[in-house]
Amino acid sequence: MTLDERERTVQVAREDFLSGERASAGLRPEIASSWRRCRLSGVEADADSVPYEPLLGANRMLTTAATPVLDWLADQLTGGTAVILADADARILDRRAEGQTLSRHLDRVLCAPGFNFGEEHIGTNGIGSVLESPGPVMIAGAEHYRDNLQGFTCVGTALRHPVHRRLVGVLDVCCRYDDTNGLMTPLLLSASREIESRMYAESSLRERMLLEEFLKVSRRTSAAVVTLNQDFIITNTAAASLLDPADHALLWEWASGSMTRRGEFAGEVRLSRDVVLHGRARTVGEVRGGPAGVLVELRRPASGSPHRRPAASRPREGDLLPGRSAAWRRALAELAAADRSGLGVLVTGEAGVGKLRATERIGGPDRTVLDAALALVEPGWPDQVRRRLALPGTLVLRHLDRTPEPLAAAVAALLDGPRAARVVATADGSSGSRLLDHFPARVEMPPLRHRPEDIADIAPVLLAQGDGQAPRLQAQALQALMALQWRGNVRELAAVLGSARLRAMGGDITVAHLPAEHRRAVAERSLPQLKRTEREAILGALTDTDGNKLAAAERLGIARSTLYRKMRALGIDDKRWA
């Protein structure tokens, strides 16, 4: 098939697809999959806008390694060819084009530094589509989803870190469609290998230390050996057989405890699939700013196989209350104690933590839920409460703290009066509503940011709720999720995973599939769990004392000079509290 015949075939398939019909035969499967992702993302074929982000905080290692290669390619380019470097989010970092004509064409489609060519923004293209494919990708002519990109042929390939193989960028060679050349792919692959080789030479001293220590220890032991820091992980065959991708982030949370001890420590390691192993960790190396990372040796218990956690803490199908953290296990124990007490129970916590779901653990199956936030829009809402209180079973008053003021006295009277039903309520923990005083038993549900290790248990349950087979969450994505604040708690996590699942199109969920604002938040937050908790405590004390440093220090039990030092170390802006 000639180039013109192929172009006509693709054009027919594209017209069929955009008209709502199934794309005709002759279309490459990877292009058809990309078009479907574009449709789900809402990309418009006739649009021409491209999102722009200033080039702040670009990957220094990538740009340092790629610049000499781009310089060399720029000197070699002929026949109207361009080479483009983008980061792991498909944002263009650099562009070198041969000839003014091609440069003007690229400028017209906003293919320039700072513009984001993610597939979810501009459709199928030789930069963004590479993030969805394991190998080199060629997008020629009408295979582009957008009309204004039809005149180009682009070949792109992923650039990966040479040690931990994490995606760090994209290299793309581009030309006018009429100038399509079979040498574009080998040129691209040769240049990408050179860039990755230079990245290895530029890789940090920490990574080299961890790699050397891993090789030294793994040669002399049959145990499962892992070296890791917050950015990457290396495992031998024995460790790979024990660990799921989701375990990498959990292992770092556990192993990073040795970083504070500057030595060795041992203990149980709780991983996914209800597996508990014996681990021994020690710090590796010493560079400016602290240890290079941690080396961990994992062994099975004496019985010879990993043992399981108690069934009460396992995630169960249909149960939205899984978790392994001490805070979550304590909350579940308090719910069980409140249930046994037979008293009225108030479940408090931030929005989205799962308060309503938690009430299912209290009372029997005969339960009714009435939402106080809807009291003014539902006719006869107080009468519904009165009638339900006269019946046996459990009445759940959701959002009790949002009861409208005109109805508060009537609801209080009902709660003080005789009733057959047991009353359980949910409310914001910071609410000052006097209605909350009617409940002798209280349980506070901890926010998700205080128990990030639970995300490894919660995420699979949320992902299993959709249609079809649940996708896997890759280790880097799980680690990214565990680093976030989650002001919307489990509800926000469910929304993020739902969006990522759509973008993954049935494949594993990676960091690239997370919403853009959450990817940016990950880049801004790199504190380990202990420091995150400490930061939250200091911010809470400053908020409660209206920024009074002396009062906040007294509340925390530390000197004011210590408070200032910790604020600087944890990146808390002093001007915010001026």
Image (cartoon, rainbow, N blue to C red):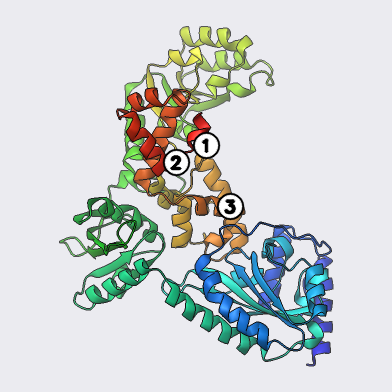
Along the line of sight, the residue nearer the viewer: 480 or 381: 480
Along the line of sight, the residue nearer the viewer: 79 or 550: 550
Q: Is residue 467 visible?
A: no
For image coordinates 47% across by 16% down, the residue present is 436
- Residue type for callout 2: Leu
- Residue type for callout 3: Gly
Looking at the picture, how far across and down is residue 24, in whole percent?
78, 77
Q: Which mark is residue 352?
A: 1
Around disc 1, counting alpha carbons within 10 Å, would you say few (fewer than 14), some (14 to 19), or many (20 or more)? some
- Disc on the earlier residue, 2 or 1: 1
Q: Which mark is residue 448?
A: 2
Task: Work out whether 46 lies above or below 384.
Answer: below
Q: Which residue is mark 3?
A: 498
- Disc on the earlier residue, 3 or 2: 2
For image coordinates 19% across by 74% down, the residue present is 221
- Residue type for callout 1: Gly
